[in-house]
Image: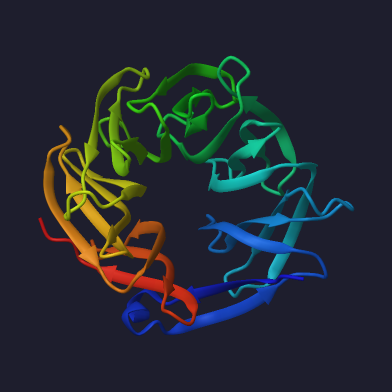
């Protein structure tokens, strides 16, 4: 049995990690939170995994809608074995979920109560594929990214509001593997992505820029501060037309550290920061005061803990 916990931190108290509320949700089956957003009504939507329907070898998507105080308003367990990795709310207060199922990248559109409007799968030449991230664009269209095999390449799909493919493209610069782990849209309608690629036996941060029509403008690989150590990009945010923030992990002296890069719209490095403590970054967001929050798993030799780093990045 595994329960999942949702904690809400007051923004002004984040440095001290003061908890406004913390609650545990679950039942007598495996459940685990994957992604959470604040909804237009001030509440929260939690995208989770659940092993149910008598099949403990498969994951099922489980939605948990909370009010502002963390009380459950409703929950929805999907009946198809699939895994969701990211959720966003649409302008009409419905939701789009990205993930994978049926050995393909997955997008699901629901109404405001979590009822499925459409469910669609995506791949190239019927090869195994999955999505790691997704964003609803300013136009209302959807952009998703991930990987497909074989060989393992980054995959990018843009759809209309009904999930119909507008364009589908792939990229690799490695004979081993190349993933896209996150994607974002800039104010001037370009698409930026980050992930991981394998070059000369080491993992490198992959960063790319695409046009709104899916054309590749550039892809670049960023080595670590200490040459030869592995790293990858996990999260990307468009700060302005000429400033992109990338968060990820780098291995220094056999320890995992969080990093943040700032690059310009041509992929040139502006600044880079390596953060303590040891740990694995899982997400990054921008604060109302112009800083950034990096969160993930922090660990020592004896335990694993939630790690939250609040850091103002300097140009």
Residue 76 visible here = yes
Q: Position of residue 79 (x, y in %)?
A: 82, 44
**Which quadrant would the C terminus be assigned to in this image?**
bottom left
Q: Position of residue 143 (x, y in %)?
A: 46, 31
x then y, percent, for residue 237? 31, 47
Count numbered badges in the picture: 0
Residue 117, by quadrant, is: top right
- Image coordinates for residue 194, horizontal then vertical, percent: 34, 40
Q: Is residue 79 left or right of residue 195?
A: right
Residue at 67% across, 73% down: 71
Q: Is residue 15 above or below residue 168?
A: below
Foreground residue among 86 and 187: 86
The reply to whether residue 235 is visible in this rendering is no
Which one is in front, 3 or 94? 3
| Depth order, front residue of 234/8 | 234
Task: Say which quadrant the N terminus sits in.
Answer: bottom right
Is 149 on the left-hand or right-hand side of 83?
left
At 31% from the left and 74% from the top, the residue drawn is 277
Report the residue at 23% width, 33% height from top.
Answer: 220
The residue positioned 30% from the left and 20% from the top of the image is 216
């Amino acid at each position: 049995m595994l329960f999942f916990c949702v904690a809400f931190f007051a923004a002004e108290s984040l440095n001290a990690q003061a908890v406004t509320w913390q609650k545990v949700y679950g039942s007598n089956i495996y459940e685990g939170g994957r992604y959470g957003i604040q909804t237009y009504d001030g509440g929260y939507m939690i995208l989770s995994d659940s092993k149910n329907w008598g099949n403990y070898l498969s994951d099922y998507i489980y939605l948990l809608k909370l009010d502002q105080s963390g009380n459950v308003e409703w929950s929805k367990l999907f009946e198809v074995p699939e895994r969701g990795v990211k959720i966003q709310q649409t302008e009409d207060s419905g939701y789009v979920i990205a993930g994978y199922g049926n050995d393909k990248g997955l997008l699901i559109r629901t109404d405001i109560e979590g009822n499925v409007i459409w469910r669609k799968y995506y791949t190239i030449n019927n090869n195994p594929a999955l999505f790691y991230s997704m964003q609803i664009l300013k136009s209302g269209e959807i952009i998703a990214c991930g990987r497909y095999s074989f060989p393992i390449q980054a995959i990018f799909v843009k759809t209309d509001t009904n999930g119909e493919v507008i364009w589908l493209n792939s990229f690799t610069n490695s004979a081993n593997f190349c993933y896209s782990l996150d994607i974002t849209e800039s104010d001037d309608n370009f698409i930026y992505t980050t992930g991981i690629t394998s070059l000369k036996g080491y993992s490198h941060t992959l960063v790319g820029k695409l046009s709104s029509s899916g054309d590749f403008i550039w892809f670049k690989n960023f080595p670590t501060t200490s040459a030869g150590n592995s790293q990858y990009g996990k999260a990307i945010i468009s700060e302005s037309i000429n400033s992109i923030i990338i968060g990820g992990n780098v291995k220094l002296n056999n320890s995992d550290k969080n990093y943040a890069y700032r690059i310009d719209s041509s992929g040139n490095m502006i600044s880079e920061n390596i953060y303590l403590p040891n740990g694995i970054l899982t997400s990054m967001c921008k604060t109302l005061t112009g800083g950034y929050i990096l969160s993930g798993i922090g660990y020592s030799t004896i335990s694993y803990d939630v790690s939250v780093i609040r850091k103002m990045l300097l140009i």
